[in-house]
Image (tube, grey):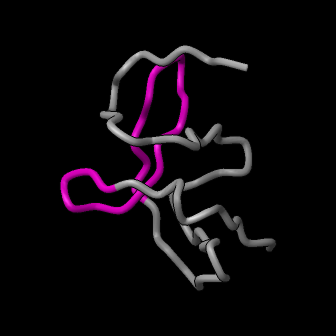
């Protein structure tokens, strides 16, 4: 199985848990993740993120359940 690796800047913290915000039905959803190895500025995600999840790459100030607009 190929590991998912993302930039560590995409990680967020909510209620003391590390995770990423994903887009689900036009709203943000915090997904708790299990981290693996670090590679320079990228981190391996062992659990909590699927291949088809749309990760919000600029999560600053977001909270779960907020509506988001998709920009180009």
The quarter of the image holding the C terminus is: top right
The quadrant of the picture occupied by the N terminus is bottom right
Would you say 32 lies left or right of 8 here? left
Q: Residue furthest right?
A: 2
The residue at the far left in this view is: 15
Estimate the x, y position of residue 13 in percent, counting from the top left.
Answer: 31, 56
Across and down, in percent, residue 3 comes to 73, 72
Expressed as whole percent of the image width and height from the top left, the position of residue 36 reads 55, 81
Q: Is residue 52 magenta?
A: no
The residue shown at (54%, 65%) is 8
Q: In the displayed structure, would residue 70 be above or below residue 17? A: above
Whether the magenta-drawn stretch holds residue 14 is answered as yes
Question: Along the line of sight, which residue is nearer the eye, 49 or 8?
Answer: 8
Q: Position of residue 12 (x, y in %)?
A: 39, 54
Residue 18 location, quadrant: bottom left
Majority secondary structure of the magenta segment? strand
In this picture, is 54 found above or below 19?
A: above
Q: Nearer the viewer, residue 1 or 37?
A: 37
In the figure, is residue 6 to the left or right of 24? right
* Residue displayed at 26% across by 51% down: 14
x 58%, y 54%: residue: 49
Q: Which residues are magenta?
A: 13-32
Please give the count of numbered marks on the rendered protein: 0
| Vertical order, 14 against 55 (above or below) | below
Dividing the picture into quarters, in which one does residue 53 lie? top right
Horizontally, residue 72 falls left or right of residue 11, namely right
Instruction: Please give the name of the residue rendered at 19% of the width and 53% of the height, measured from the top-left corner.
Output: 15
């Amino acid at each position: 199985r190929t590991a998912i690796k993302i930039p560590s800047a995409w990680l967020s913290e909510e209620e003391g848990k590390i995770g990423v915000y994903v887009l689900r039905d036009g709203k943000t959803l915090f997904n708790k993740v299990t981290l693996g190895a670090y590679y320079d500025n990228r981190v391996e995600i062992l659990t909590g993120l699927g291949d088809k999840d749309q990760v919000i790459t600029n999560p600053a100030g977001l909270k779960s359940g907020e509506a988001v607009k998709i920009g180009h």
